[in-house]
Image (tube, helix red, strand yellow):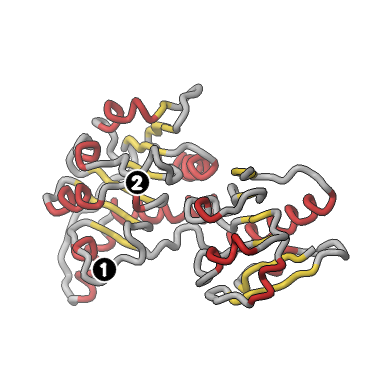
Amino acid sequence: MELWIPDQAGRGAVGELPDDVRLNVFARKGPPPDVVLNAEFLVPSHATRGLLELLPRMESLAVIQALSAGIDWLMPAVPRGVTLCNARGTRDGAVAEWVIAALLALTKNLPELQNRQLEHQWQWTEPGDLAGRRVMILGYGSIGKAVERRLKGFDVEIIRVARQRRRGVYQIQELPALLTSTEVLVVLLPFTAETEGLLSENMLARLPPGALVINAARGGIVENAGLLTLLQAGRLRAALDVTDPEPLPEDHPLWDAPGVLITPHVAGDSPAASRNAFALVGDQVRRYVRGEQLANVVEHRQ
């Protein structure tokens, strides 16, 4: 069996593979070599130029295993007869740590204080408090649970929201009413047709003045123009690891909006997260060779 994986940090965690598996490595940023067309089990990288265009020509392709939980960038390109799996659970810790770091940075005014340091200004400002705040986790999956575990020591009130209602978890349809008392909105939803543009200006305007928006999901879930309007009015502050589009153009007004912290889609990246993702790849390959059910199956396209 031909296994192809990208040449990036952590790939050694794939571990020992069955004797009949041939491991091949392609350059992460591509373009990949033509022999990748022989792949039966493919681990793509979103950074690999030209790889998605080759998928329809991979006649032996049976499994695509992503290295990320989000697979919206892959879905349109998956050929018929191919099983698509995500890496749910492997990057929970990294994303949760970024959320906590961003939340504390905004609460304690660290971006503004960093700017004053660069200007050599010793100017006092009173930091805020995280304790006592009402924090909504919008997208209460494995990452949302990891965020909640890390928030428990901060004496905050948690509101859990997911696509489907269950015990202790509200459903998205209840979002408009819930937002009016939400002081911190953590966005962790998957990007789908239903969630695209969900957080419009009207929806965001329901948040109380001074609320924080932390987006570690996908930029397209938040309406850019609406968020920008509320940032410029001083109604909200935000930490964005994702934007729409990506990369964010150099002249985009979000860069200079007041009260915003922007990072270049790095929340899920860390040495441990990469090792976890590639360890999952190894487990999946061994399951596949043994004829066992694969984990994290998102779709088997007929």
Q: Nearer the viewer, residue 134 or 13?
A: 13
Tag 2's secondary structure? helix
Q: Which residue is mark 1?
A: 114
Work out which quarter of the rendered image holds the N terminus and state it. bottom right
* Residue 261, percent from left and from top: 29, 60
Q: Of all residues shown, which one is farthest toward the right?
A: 19
- In the picture, measured across the screen, residue 222 lies left or right of residue 169, that is left
- Residue 179: assigned label: none
The residues tagged by marks 1 and 2 sit, at their Cα atoms, a distance apart of 29 Å
Q: Which residue is mark 2?
A: 221
- In the picture, measured across the screen, residue 160 lies left or right of residue 133, that is right
Q: Nearer the viewer, residue 165 or 58?
A: 58
> In the rendered image of this protein, does residue 112 appear above or below residue 26?
above
Q: Of all residues shown, which one is farthest toward the left?
A: 233
For badge 2, the amino acid type reads: Ile
- In the picture, measured across the screen, residue 291 lies left or right of residue 138, that is right
Q: Of all residues shown, which one is farthest toward the top?
A: 167
Of pointers 1 and 2, the one earlier in the residue sequence = 1
Q: Nearer the viewer, residue 252 or 20?
A: 20
For badge 1, the amino acid type reads: Gln
Quarter where residue 276 is shown: bottom right
- In the picture, measured across the screen, residue 78 lies left or right of residue 168, that is right
* Residue 115, percent from left and from top: 22, 69
* Residue 171, percent from left and from top: 41, 27
At 86% across and 64% down in the image, what residue appears? 20
At 50% across and 23% down in the image, what residue appears? 166
Q: Residues within 10 Å of mark 1 (few under 14, many from 20)?
A: few
Q: Marks 1 and 2: which is nearer the front?
A: 2
* Residue 108, percent from left and from top: 28, 54
